[in-house]
Image (cartoon, rainbow, N blue to C red):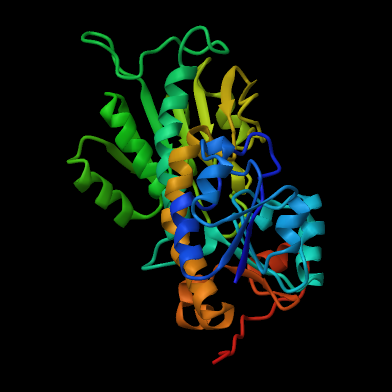
Amino acid sequence: MRIGIPKENHKEERRIALTPAGVDALTRAGHTVFIESGAGSGSNFSDGDFVKTGATIVYSKNEAFNLSEMIVKVAPLVEDEVDMLQENQVLFSFLHLAVGNKKIITELLRKKITAIGYELIEKDGGLPVLHSMSEIAGQLAIQVAERYLESFNKGGRGILLGGIPGVAPAAVVILGAGVVGKTAARAALGRGAQVIVLDKDLQRLRSLENEFRRRITTVMANTYTISRGVKFADVLIGAVLIKGEKTPHLVTEDMVKQMKKGAVIVDVSIDQGGCVETSRLTTVSDPVFLAHDVIHYCVPNMPALVSRTASYGLNNAAFGYVQNIAENSLSNALLEDPGLSKGVCTYQGYCSNEAIADIFKVEFRRLRVFSTN
């Protein structure tokens, strides 16, 4: 199979979908990998690193798209990229179509692209590709919050996350007990913060309490407890995920108005719309803004801050799926792996994800795949 890895369009997206090790395994199996020159530079992989693995370097994004049967990338498509897609190509990427531009979904359907969203692939009840990025985002959320609590950063509260003897630590309130929430809780606890986790799933809360040996406080999430938790927080981590759908605003603007001056919100849910009403997209180079005297950090691609680690993590999680399609054909890979098929958003000209079809008012059809053997 011919596989293309274009350089990411956004200057602040420094990850690459496959590392030299992943490319090496594909070329050894007889596949051709086209990599746009400079695609790995943001993660400190040179063109030479990929040439050594048998990859072919191309010198424009158009070449990477035109020569390939499958495109493997990281960031959601932008309009000029969707224009470059060829009919019947396979696209592997984070898609986040639920909060995207209608032109993107329209073109994917018109060109009969098989678009597979990393964030939707399932395995053993989890989301294996998203999991690796969520682990990174959870740790980074606490690093970011710690930085912006400092007095000289946008008017932070001037609080040391872990406190000192005789001085209380910061209160870190985490909304959501999934992978991001759990990882953030571990990072905050390790720094000595007071940690409170809210979730509507009692089993998740019970699991967290057991894992952290009751050193955190867990609370059932509802409007009343969220309001109280937000008001108490020095740091609020938004770690809510509804698979494939836009995240609801569980923290209202009125709640934000009740927060402490100089408190920090890190809305990790922002790539799906954000769980805080006052959140809006920010960037790595301009990551924060003030709303009601509260610092908001709403960067959708947080793992790009540690692009090399993130690229290795993404390669480890996604490579098996890329390899399966390359070795066995798209149809057979989807037939033998129901979890992979759940990641398919568009297929042969129709939308195979009901939530996305409802949002954009396009035809929904359940995925029907037939073996090519």
> Closest to the observer: 82 or 355?
82
Q: Residue at point 61% right, 39% down?
A: 13
Q: Residue at point 50% right, 38% down?
A: 307
Left or right of residue 327: residue 86: right
Q: Where's residue 264, x and y in %?
A: 50, 23
Left or right of residue 211: residue 12: right
Q: Residue at point 51% right, 35% down?
A: 44
- Report which quarter residue 291 is drawn in: top right
Extreme-left residue of the structure: 213
Q: Where's residue 181, x and y in %?
A: 39, 42
Q: Where's residue 76, x and y in %?
A: 66, 51
Depicted 184 relative to depicted 291: above or below: below
Quadrant in which the N terminus is drawn: bottom right
Depicted 276 relative to depicted 360: above or below: above
Q: Is residue 243 visible?
A: no
Q: Is residue 283 visible?
A: yes
> Closest to the observer: 202 or 245?
245
> Closest to the observer: 81 or 94?
81
Left or right of residue 130: residue 280: right
- Report which quarter residue 34 is drawn in: bottom right
Q: Say how many tags the image has.
A: 0
Q: Where's residue 27, x and y in %?
A: 51, 64
Depicted 68 relative to depicted 64: above or below: below
Quadrant in which the C terminus is drawn: bottom right
